[in-house]
Amino acid sequence: MKYFEDFGLGDKQVASSTYRVTEEEIIEFGTRFDPQPFHTDPVAAADSIFGGLVASSTHLFSIAVALTQHLGDKVAAVSALGFDGVRVLAPARPGDELGMRTETVGARRSKSRPDCGIVEGSSEMFNQNDEIVFRYHAAFLVLLRAAGEATS
């Protein structure tokens, strides 16, 4: 288990696994949550500015969250506090293999929760060509080691 004290400024991690985007998943997710033709209809998508199906930004965010589960040890996270600077930098298409890397850019003790610290990370999701597809900055509330061990 990784606690607040285990995060150091500049620490970098790369997810141990990747995520393959499928046409079926793009269509299903798009149909349910972002019904734009370039997410739901291969024929219409071919005539769009993307020239084919692409994953929606909310789909990419979901994939990014899933990939963070493979960044190393499980984290004693209490809650996400927010996401800033969310950017879609390139389309994700069927067959793309997405990976994730993150860097710890901030870590401080919480003033309102003495049993926790706030960890900030800068994350980017990239495709098989190392092209950055999605980027964001996140803040999380993470238990201090003594608090985590007391709740085990």
Image: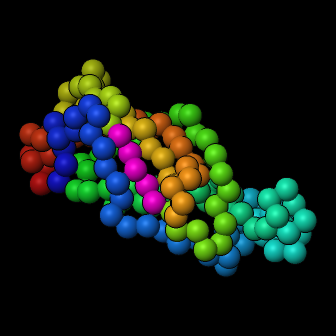
Between residues 95 and 80, which one lies in front from this camera angle?
Answer: 95
Between residues 14 and 6, which one lies in front from this camera angle?
Answer: 14
Left or right for 113, reference 105: left
Residue 72: image location, x then y, percent: 26, 57
**With respect to residue 150, does 33 lie above or below?**
below
Left or right for 57, reference 70: right
Left or right for 52, reference 25: right
Q: Kindly report the secondary structure that dominates the magenta region of the rendered protein.
A: strand
Residue 121: image location, x then y, percent: 38, 38
**With respect to residue 85, does 97 lie above or below?**
below
Taking the magenta stretch, the answer to whether it contains residue 102 is yes
Residue 118: image location, x then y, percent: 31, 32
Residue 68: image location, x then y, percent: 39, 55
Q: Please report the bounds of the magenta region as a residue range.
A: 99-103
The residue at the point 12 percent across, 41 percent down is 145
The residue at the point 68 percent across, 76 percent down is 23
Q: Is residue 28 visible?
A: no
Taking the magenta stretch, the answer to whether it contains residue 15 is no
Between residues 76 and 27, which one lies in front from this camera angle?
Answer: 27
The residue at the point 32 percent across, 28 percent down is 106
Which quadrant would the N terminus be assigned to in this image?
A: bottom left
The residue at the point 26 percent across, 25 percent down is 108
Pick out the residue farthest to the top. Answer: 111
Q: Is residue 71 visible?
A: yes
